[in-house]
Image (cartoon, helix red, strand yellow):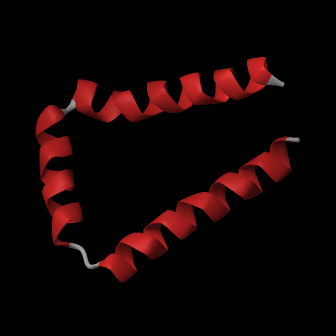
Amino acid sequence: MWKTALTAIALLLILEGLIPFISPDAMRKYMQKIQQMNDQKLRFAGLTAMVAGVLMLFLVR
């Protein structure tokens, strides 16, 4: 159980590190856009990401 959870966290960190490693300038621009978004849009983006993750887990398992 813990091995699977830690593997998932490790993969998340790898994926989240790709964009700033490959294109730091694009990451800065993206972060500026995020700062300008209102709370409702940010929450919707978070909800969308969570639903996509649940669907992917459902399909993979």
Q: Nearer the viewer, residue 22 or 36?
A: 36
Percent position (x, y) of residue 24? 16, 33
Furthest residue in direction right, as rendered: 61
Q: Nearer the viewer, residue 54 or 19?
A: 54
Q: In the image, 1: left or right of 41?
A: right
Residue that appears at 55% across and 67% down: 48
Furthest residue in direction front, as rendered: 2
Residue 42's place in the image compared with 40, above or below, is: above
Residue that appears at 77% across and 22% down: 2
Q: Nearer the viewer, residue 13 or 56?
A: 13
Percent position (x, y) of residue 6? 66, 22
Residue that appears at 25% across and 32% down: 20
How many marks can you see? 0
Q: Quadrant of the C terminus?
A: top right
Residue 27's place in the image compared with 50, above or below, is: above
Q: Quadrant of the N terminus?
A: top right
Percent position (x, y) of residue 47? 55, 69
Residue 45, quarter of picture: bottom left
Residue that appears at 18% across and 64% down: 35
Residue 8's place in the image compared with 36, above or below, is: above
Percent position (x, y) of residue 58? 84, 52
